[in-house]
Amino acid sequence: MISFVSAFAFFLLLHSIPAIPVIRSSIITHIGRPTYFIGYSAASIVALVWLFSAALALDYVPLWDLRPWHAAITFILAPLGSFLVIAGLLSANPLSVTIRSSEKVGAVVGITRHPVLWGFAIWAFGHIVANGDLRSLLLFGGFALFSLGSIAITEKRARRRLGGRWKTVSKDTSIVPLAAFFSGRRPACDLSMLFAALIAVALGAWLLFGGGHALLFGADPIAVFG
């Protein structure tokens, strides 16, 4: 448990401290943007490997009996969450988390102005349902809480950074997914969303049918229907 707590603390610090604009700008100024993103990506991979390894080392404590419909929920939520994360990262979005620096907004922002954070939470929740044990609840529940808790902070920073432009840029968007559509906004799509959909489908196919999930995590999600 000590290793798991330490790994999660490292993960939280890694994704919290560099997110502070002053700190991130200072680091980028000193080492350059390419070096920063390469180093940050490498550190994130290390953090995730450590965290998943520590979680798998915990004792298996079942919380509820698993049924095939639990896995079916994951097959819906995990790809949806993955798509939102990928689309959010690839799309221009000054309102939230993205790897793009443009001040424009991509079509995915019409779904929610925080697609990466919602996507990560949806992906994590799907894995809680399908696993049904304590270590999965701690791991994926921690991911979901961190993502959802980051929305308010990200929202506040975007409002402060954009100032008077906030109302114009955030028009026809919403925090809650799809709320803008129910308010009359027309659905839209762009190249970033299409590319994200292709990546999500390819990634999902490899994980489920190409043995990727079993290779990475030692479990075959399709086996539950066998």
Image: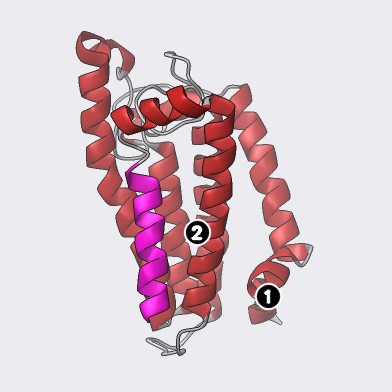
Q: In the figure, residue 64 lies in which quadrant?
A: bottom left
- Amino acid at pointer 2: Ala
Quadrant showing the N terminus: bottom left
Does the magenta run of residues contain 202? no
Can residue 33 be seen at all in this image of the molecule?
yes
Provide residue 23's location: percent of width, then percent of height. Answer: 33, 33
Q: Which residue lies furthest to the right in this view?
A: 210
Q: In this view, does 160 lie above or below 145?
A: above
Residue with the mark numbered 1 = 220
Q: In this view, does 221 lie above or below 118?
A: below
Residue located at (59% from left, 28% from top): 34
SS at circle 2? helix
Provide residue 122's location: percent of width, then percent of height. Answer: 43, 54
Q: Is residue 4 above or below residue 57?
A: above
Q: In the figure, residue 136 lies in which quadrant?
A: bottom left
Provide residue 103's location: percent of width, then percent of height. Answer: 42, 13
Residue located at (44% from left, 51% from top): 120
Q: What stretch is highlighted in magenta?
A: 1-17
Most foreground residue, 43 or 93: 43
Provide residue 180's location: percent of width, then percent of height. Answer: 32, 29
Quadrant showing the C terminus: bottom right
Residue with the mark numbered 2 = 47
How much space separates mark 2 and mark 1, taking CA atoms?
Answer: 23 Å
